[in-house]
Amino acid sequence: MIFVRLRSILLRCAAMSLVFVSSGAFSQVPSVKVLQEGLAGYSGSQDAWINKGKKVKNFGSKRVLKYKARRFNLLVEFPIFHSEGGPVPDGSDIQSATLSLYKKSSSGQQALSATRLLEAWDEESVNWNQRADGAPWSSPGAKRKGQDIAAQADGVSTVGAGPQWLDIDVSEGVRQMSLGNLENHGWLIGGANQNKKVAKFFSREAASRKAQFRPKLTITYTPPSPGMPNDTGLTACIDEQGAEQDCPVSGLPGQDAEYGRDVTHNDDSDGHAGFSFTKLDENGDALPANAAEWSCVRDNVTGLIWEVKNQTGGLHYAGNTYTWYGSNVFGEYQDDFDQYVKDGGECIGSRCDTEGFVEAVNRSGLCGKNDWRMPTNAELVNLMDFSVLSLPITYYRSGITLDSDYFPNSLESRYWTNAYLGGQYATAVPFSNGEGWDIHDALPVHLVRGTDAGLLESPLTVDGDEVTDRRTGLIWRRCPLGYEWVSGSAACEASDGNESFIWSWSEAMGRVEVLRQESGKNWRVANVKELYSAMTPAPEFRQSSSDPKFYTREITFPQTVLPSGENASSTLLPNGTVIRFLNWGGGDLFGGSVLPPDNYVGYFGEAPLLVREAQ
């Protein structure tokens, strides 16, 4: 048997067997969540009523909520999204949301509205005059539009005279919350008519025998694709001298930092820039961002949950190392690898190989779950923040590229993934340096749980000169910049017959702008994580195969276009001297200057691939 050392952090397309150790198949269907205090494991809601006649009295702990036109108002709030401790993934597509209160007394027909509250309030101290201790309403009774409450109600509904549910459509408000356009502080329930009778509704404190009548929020949603990549963490563009500047920069347009979550969700309160993380305790419950101790971290963008390492020892000690091992993946050489690879690392609390570690963590029920697994290459790369890479970039580069506020004990090391390359090699992703690596080597592991979107059957849909990735929602131009799809020959051909394109950055981006205008589609150069997201092995080749293929090389993006398999990305690192490339044949990340005299980004074998979001 001949073994070849691999330089990549993903697999090269070479003649070797390919096995992925992973979870079940991915499906994307609408979900329904009913948020009701004390039922189905849900908690954290708050409600209260405020009384104009008793302006400083708090009614937050009562079992009944009272409404009377111009005298009593109701307040309700539900943690909805993962980032605030709720059950709905951040960024979900909200189909509908209904706020429901059960009227327990007869008070005649009444029309009531639900208007979003714009400021945080506290159930234990809210009253007619204040929303929390030391924090008065802008206008007593939370009446001032644009400050206490939104200018328009989310919905209005009528409830009949007798005991029954009041259902108010609040879909648009919840939809805007999911998009990140609004903060969630709940709703003020007020009158839309002049019926002055007192209406009584069950509160979240209603007795357990009446729990089914507590306030509830019913949400129908489609979760975001688990394959959607995080942004890169880059928030500044660079100029032609390599200095960081606000975006966009004349002469160097179309940079990574101009697009994505790092622009639309640039908030460091839950992770750098567009990253969004939530700390979880040992039971899997959400903790505040300033929690001093936590066991897991939820990535609110991808929905994946990650193991967190510690420095105190035991099963999750950061210094534990493992050899790469699977009991049913080595074929005719299983007995040899059982002898030489199994239990070959140094660790505490488990057998010191990857399979043994996964089994031990699942037995322990980390964060209340037992479906932990090895991560894919793309999932680990997705955690990287490219804004903190140490420079210069070399083959053996240094610098931890994870958010230390959430992963404080991750090492400057390669971390195993689930991909066995064949022979004596598996893949490892660098948090300082890395390559496809010998399975005899002892390396650390970051376990993950959640859907492996890479297992989706036929994730790429071809439509003429475009390719849609159903895992991420991204639409790719089938041919790189400078090439056009020719349906008759089913191939990409140079648009001017010349396959040697040498462009400056600005020339290349100028061509992209022309293409946008001519096509009416918002094409841009893909960033490095988007390129990774497209590089998924075909499911039919996941088991033993003498010729592993990628959708991206063999089926949808023609192999003959880019013999070297190299494409420029839009990801420019902080000092502006390095551009990231992706090698489809091996997954290498490496640098190339975009500043004079080496300021080209497109030539044969390195033409940029273009991507866009669905319009």
Image (spheres, rainbow, N blue to C red):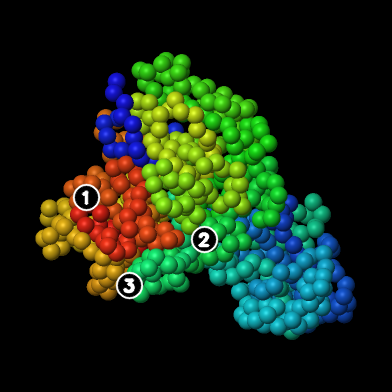
Within the image, what quadrant is residue 54 found in? bottom right
Closer to us: 518 or 71 = 518
Within the image, what quadrant is residue 193 found in? bottom right
Query: Label 2 belongs to which residue?
Result: 274
The disc labelled 1 sits on which kind of residue?
Leu
Observer able to see residue 351: yes
The quarter of the picture where the C terminus appears is bottom left
The disc labelled 2 sits on which kind of residue?
Gly
Residue found at x 61% / y 65%: 98
Residue 251: mark: 3
Task: Give the alpha-carbon distance from disc 3 to disc 2, as whole Å.
Answer: 26 Å
In the rendered structure, the answer to whether residue 242 lies left or right of residue 489 reads right
Pointers 1 and 2 in contact (CB under 8 A)? no
Pointers 3 and 2 in contact (CB under 8 A)? no
The x, y position of residue 552, in whole percent, is 29, 47
Closer to us: 489 or 70 = 489
Residue 562: mark: 1
Q: Say above or below: 127 vs 317.
A: below
In the rendered structure, the answer to whether residue 362 lies left or right of residue 101 reads left
Q: Residues within 10 Å of mark 3 (few under 14, many from 20)?
A: some
Residue found at x 79% / y 81%: 140
